[in-house]
Image (cartoon, rainbow, N blue to C red):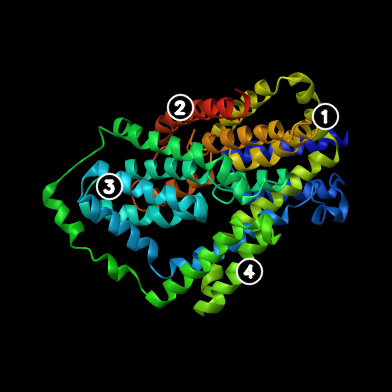
Amino acid sequence: MSAVAALTIFVVAYVFIATEKINKVKVVLIAAGLMAVLGLIPGSEVFFSEHEGVDWNVIFLLFGMMVIVGIVKQTGLFDYLAIWAAKKSRGKPYRLMVMLMLITAVGSPFLDNVTTIMLVAPVTVVVCNRLRISPQPYLIAEILASNIGGAATLIGDPPNIIIGSRAGLTFNDFLVHMAPVVVAIFAAFVLLTRVLFRKSFEYHPERVAAVMALNERRAITDMAMLRRCLAVFALVVVGFCLQTVIGLDPAIVALVGAGLMLLVTNADVNDVLEEVEWPTLIFFFGLFVMVAGLVHTGVIGAVGEFTATAFGDNYLLAATSLLFGSAVFGAFFDNIPYVATLAPIVQGITDGIADPAISDALWWAFALGADFGGNGTAVAASANVVAIGIAARSGHPISFWQFTKYGIIVTIWSTALAWLYVWLRYFA
């Protein structure tokens, strides 16, 4: 009965999260509370158990990076980059889109795609307004680029953080195994956008002067502060890359980096903390408690055993199913709760595989499917929801289907290319 109760609570909560009928933070807190009241989670161990409780590595890694980005934002760096891209493009629509996508794709692996979108999208609206062209195609392209680029690293996309923590994969592991295919797929995506958005490109030579008149240097509000921020950020990235050498988890590196950046910049702590996405952190917390209920009552274990039996020793079939299955489910549900739910099942499958290379291949297939599935629909990933909200507030709303008609196409071909990569690198 406890398993049925836990599964019922989880499914009902998942439906509300997917349909967005109720704010998702309220949903997970109510669901987590019910799990606790009914005794479906392992008591106080939910705060301490690595496999049956809150994954604090994920929570504090996100928190540390949010603080770092909140400080960097005060320097005006991201406004500078966006204006610079607009001027370099000389108002040419496709060139402008490529420049903005490139900034988004390069920033996403190191700042996470949600944060990058929050910083780049408002500036995109400003630049498009100056040119008096529709910003929707550019915002949609940036969202798609952020989900592709974010897949490259451990911290680039929230699902990767969950997978890395669960599978014991390091920042360098993601760089070696995910970055190559992400670079290739992003390059193909840049070419694809020329076709996808061809009817949306507008060029008005008389309006280009408005953009060329912008002085990007004025966007930098504090050059000395920016230099210190970049120096600390470089140390944080080095810390991520040397994780196996220095023996510090990415969460510790991010927290130390956040503290050091606060110290050397003398930024106002209250102002910085206002930039932290507290609802996102609370959502993760509640979600982990919900998943703990499924693990503790045996639901996850039962599903994992059934799945392992179904695949048998055909690990290519297992990788294919994880890749395409994650892309499909990730496209119609937020890929964060999806990955948090399925990660224990994947771990159960990989624990029974003697060859660690094959075991890791299943995790990479899982990550690629979930990350690229985030482009499938308007509600598939947090970056999508954030950017669409920014567009609506700026008076340029993007409808569910306006985004999805592009997102589905990108998800299909990027997942197909990802499967080819997995097959050639790990099974051929």
Q: Residue at x 65, y 27 (%)?
A: 319
Q: Earlier in the sequence, mark 2 or mark 4?
A: 4
Q: Amino acid at mark 3?
A: Leu
Do the residues under discs 1 and 4 have CB atoms within 8 angstroms? no
Amino acid on which the number 2 mark rests in the picture: Trp
Q: CA distance from mark 2 to mark 1?
A: 33 Å
Given residues 277 and 17, the one toward you in this image is: 277
User: Of the residues under marks 2 and 1, which one precedes in the sequence?
Assistant: 1
Q: Are marks 1 and 3 in contact (CB under 8 Å)?
A: no
Q: Which residue is mark 3?
A: 96
In the rendered image, residue 31, in percent from the top left (x then y), is placed at: 73, 46
Does the image show residue 222?
no
- Residue 302 numbered mark, or none: 1
Residue furthest bottom in the image: 266
Q: Residues within 10 Å of mark 1 (few under 14, many from 20)?
A: some
Residue labelled with disc 4: 256
Secondary structure beneath label 1: helix
The one nearer the camera, 1 or 120, is 120
Residue placed under numbered mark 2 in the picture: 413
Write down the quadrant of residue 315 in the picture.
top right
Give the distance between the C-alpha atoms of the residues marked 1 and 3, in whole angstroms.
Answer: 51 Å
- Pointer 3 with pointer 2, Cβ within 8 A: no
**Residue 245, relative to residue 397: is it above or below?**
below
Direction from residue 63 to residue 148 in the image, left or right: left
Element type where label 3 sits in the image: helix
Q: Earlier in the sequence, mark 4 or mark 3?
A: 3
Q: Secondary structure at mark 4?
A: helix
Amino acid, disc 1: Ala
Query: In the image, which is nearer the foreground, mark 2 or mark 1?
Result: 2
Element type at mark 2? helix
Q: Amino acid at mark 4?
A: Val
Query: Mark 4 against mark 3, which lies toward the viewer?
Result: 4
